[in-house]
Image (cartoon, grey):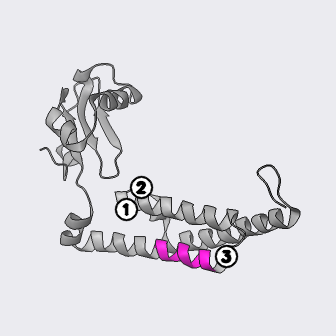
Amino acid sequence: MENWMTASMPILGKVLISIIAIFTVMIIITRISGLRTFAKMSSFDFASTIAVGSVLASIILNPDQSLLKGGIALAGIIAFQTLFALLVRKSKFFKNLATNDPLLLMKDGKILYKNLEKSNVGEGDLIAKLREANVLDYSEVRAVVLESTGDMSVLHDDGDNKLNDQLLEGVRIH
């Protein structure tokens, strides 16, 4: 009998076998689909990673789940993610429909409050990211970009280096 503190040896054995089997399947799928499988390049990639984690946990922790069913679910998620990435790369229409453009939150030491409001990012969150990037003064900040993944990129320099315009290509300013 299983409870919250113990589990029977057959259950523990099945969990161990499930871990080995499903991670073997995951390694094979990742090798076939490439390194992008777990890259957080878009919000869809992030959602796919969460879905993969959920499926993995369900298969490993639920003794009633089929390893075959789990392997097919994982392969399906990764295949859909690969198709999505291909469509985004090949179709400008699909890219505009399915992904968010990065948004400029700060430029040349000035906070863009309207963009903070549009993106639902608080000034405190922005300042926390600046601290995380070791920014000592707003004047060091060339740009802060809210990426399509939800991450914030802080581009800063304590010298007189100018920001290369190419780094802001595709970034919405308003």
Extreme residue in the top direction: 137
Distance Cα–Cα, label 2 vs label 1? 8 Å
Q: Could you tell me how far apart the alpha carbons at marks 3 and 1 are, in whole angstroms?
A: 25 Å
* Residue range corresponding to the magenta coloring: 69-78
Whether residue 163 appears in this view of the structure is no
The residue lying at 60 percent from left, 69 percent from top is 26
Of the 4 image quadrants, the one containing the N terminus is: bottom right
Q: Position of residue 3 (x, y in %)?
A: 79, 54
Distance from the alpha carbon under mark 3 to that under mark 2? 26 Å
To which residue does mark 3 refer?
67
Residue at (25% x, 28% y) in the render: 141
Q: Disc 3, disc 1: CB below 8 Å?
A: no
Q: Amino acid at mark 1?
A: Phe
Report if the CB atoms under discs 3 and 2 are less than 8 Å apart.
no
| Residue 40: image tag | 2
Whether residue 76 appears in magenta in the rendering, the answer is: yes
Q: Which residue is mark 1?
A: 44
38 vs 114, left or right, is: right
